């Protein structure tokens, strides 16, 4: 079956522009995670959605970052007024439930010029 | 204290060597533990889950020590293809948020 799908795979944007990153999780997976990975670094937690519970937004680095998950399926991560330090690979993962193994998408490589 | 901490790398070992990585976690209520492998410029992929009694998958052995709050990964008879970054993952919080360690880079040399 289809895995986690992320789009776009690459995004180049100018500093100050807004960007939207999309994640389509595996069908039926109730848990969805966003992580950020800078070059040579580990995965930085951003936000976690689990079913109908309030999302854990504790990892969002600033109020320029927001995410939503509509209908318990597709999620969009929005970065407003992008800065150069936002350049990274943004990884989305889903799991059948909280605590189960995560399945990752291929990521979106964001470059802010 | 970070929620999940890993051995700093890099580890450079010859083919055939045995290598072990440790990962400590701060939340004593953590319930789920995994090891992931990440190749350069690729997404992380599940290597193995870590069970309370310890578990083995071929050349790989994972163990959990709840008393000392760490998990370990042992790789026996290292192959060149084992070269990658190994990430530990631990659930935190009542909702099973998953947090990653920073990763340990392994290079297996001929």
Image (cartoon, coloured by chain):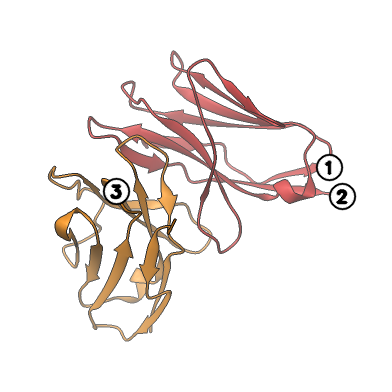
Residue A108 percent location from the top left of the image: 40, 69
Residue A87 percent location from the top left of the image: 39, 72
Residue position for label 3: A28
Q: Mark 2–mark 1 contact, CB under 8 Å?
A: yes
Residue in the image at 31% along x and 33% along y: B92
Binning the other alpha carbons within 10 Å of mark 3 as few (below 14), some (14 to 19) or many (20 upward) gives few
Binning the other alpha carbons within 10 Å of mark 2 as few (below 14), some (14 to 19) or many (20 upward) gives few
Residue B67 percent location from the top left of the image: 44, 13
Can you see residue B1?
no
Which residue is most to the right? B110
State which chain disc 3 sits on.
A
- Measured Cα–Cα span from mark 2 to mark 1: 5 Å
Residue in the image at 43% along x and 65% along y: A107
- Measured Cα–Cα span from mark 2 to mark 3: 44 Å
Task: Confirm whether circles 3 and 1 share one chain.
Answer: no
Q: Tell me what hue chain B is rendered in.
A: red
Q: Which chain is orange?
A: A
Can you see residue A26?
yes
Numbered disc 1: secondary structure? loop
Residue position for label 1: B15
Residue position for label 2: B110
Above or below, B110 against A86 in this view is above
Task: Confirm whether circles 2 and 3 share one chain.
Answer: no
Numbered disc 2: secondary structure? loop
Residue in the image at 52% along x and 15% along y: B53
């Amino acid at each position: 079956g289809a895995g986690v799908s992320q789009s776009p795979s690459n995004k180049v944007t100018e500093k100050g522009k807004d960007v939207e990153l999309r994640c389509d999780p595996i069908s039926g997976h109730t848990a969805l995670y966003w992580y950020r990975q800078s070059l040579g670094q580990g995965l930085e937690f951003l936000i976690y959605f689990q079913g109908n519970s309030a999302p854990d937004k504790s990892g969002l680095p600033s109020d320029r970052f927001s995410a939503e998950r509509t209908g318990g399926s597709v999620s969009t991560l929005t970065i407003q007024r992008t800065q150069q330090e936002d350049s990274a690979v943004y990884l989305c993962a889903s799991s059948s439930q909280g605590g189960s193994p995560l399945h990752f998408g291929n990521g979106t490589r964001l470059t802010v010029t | 204290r970070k929620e999940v901490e890993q051995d700093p790398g890099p580890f450079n070992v010859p083919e055939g060597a045995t290598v072990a990585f440790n990962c400590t976690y701060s939340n004593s209520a953590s319930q789920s533990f995994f090891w992931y492998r990440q190749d350069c410029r690729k997404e992380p992929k599940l290597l193995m889950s870590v069970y309370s009694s310890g578990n083995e998958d071929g050349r790989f052995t994972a163990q959990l020590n709840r008393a000392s709050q760490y998990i370990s990964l042992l790789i026996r008879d290292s192959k060149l293809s084992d070269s990658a970054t190994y990430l530990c993952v631990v659930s935190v919080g009542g909702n099973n948020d998953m947090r990653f360690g920073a990763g340990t880079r392994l290079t297996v040399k001929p």
